[in-house]
Image (tube, grey):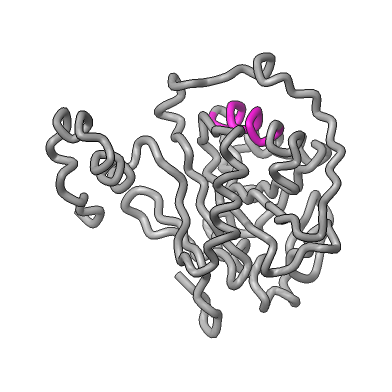
Amino acid sequence: QVGVGETPPRHMHIHGSAAAQAMATRVAWVVVLLLSWLGAAMQLQPEAQLGFSGARACEKAPESTYVVVSVFAGRRNRMDIELVYLDRLLETCAVDEVHLWNHTFNKEDDAWLSTLRNRPGYTVLDVENFDDYQEAYKYYSRTGTNHTVRVNGVIVLGRFAPAWAGADEDNTIILKVDDDIAYIDVARFPCFIDYIRRTPEMFIVHANVVNNGVAAYYQAQQDPDMLREFPALSEYPDMLR
């Protein structure tokens, strides 16, 4: 859904059979849905193996890309794994900011999400209506100058302003990420960002997804063995059924 008078977003997110919320105007709003929690048994790497230190010392060149990960959060029983990877992306400077939109539905998750307010690189944004995902759209859009949002517990009037002075609408990429990601290929993540930056004509840029019918169809076109094992993937899925 796009607000009245708004420019349609350059990128939109479709998850399963449900149409996603439109999230941004010229600022690239890209989807990263790398693996759902249902695939949690696949390729999980504990924090000790990834060697996280929590330290950040990022210096950006003028031609750099400014990357913001925006998550509708936060189910703790889903996000514990995801945070390991987000921490790693922040530490390696592959991501500059992580925005956690508070869409929790119980006090326990809300209390847990609040503990992330002081986590380096993270910002928790509270919403008045937990079912209204237009809050994020307004915050990132050009018309968000008079929008009120609570950022890390402080009420702020205005729209998103990158922390890096060199960021603008052409070099900023905002990635919409679900809160139930179980694996992110942190080594190849910069290649994904680079592709998005180099192909501004693309309306939708979507990561390779496990546990999604549309992605499975395209994966099968590239893998004859997969197609032989699952012949139903020879036809594009009807997501409206």
Q: Quadrant of residue 172?
A: bottom right
- Residue at the far top: name it: 48
Quarter of the figure with the N terminus: bottom left
Point out residue 21 in the picture as x, y percentages from the top left corner. 48, 62
Q: Main secondary structure of the magenta part?
A: helix
x and y percentages locating residue 190 in the rendered image:
62, 43
- Residue visible at 41% across and 27% down? 39
Total labels: the figure holds 0
Task: Look at the image and tell me whether residue 112 can be seen.
Answer: no
**As rendered, which of 33 and 77 lies closer to the eye?**
33
Relative placement, left or right, of 68 versus 181 is: right
Where, by quadrant of the figure, is residue 146 drawn?
bottom right
Q: Position of residue 177 (x, y in %)?
A: 55, 46
Residue 221 in the image, given as x and y percentages of width and height: 24, 43
Q: Residue 105, can we see it?
A: yes
Q: Is residue 157 left or right of residue 47?
A: right
Residue drawn at point x = 56 percent, y = 42 percent: 105
What are the residue bounds of the magenta stretch? Answer: 78-87
Residue 50 in the figure: left or right of residue 199: right
In the image, taking residue 24 as reference, residue 18 lies left or right, namely left
- Residue at the location (55% across, 40% down)? 179
Residue 136 within the magenta-colored segment of the rendering? no
Vertical arrangement, residue 9 with respect to residue 77, above or below: below
- Residue drawn at the location 59% of the way across and 63% of the way down: 28
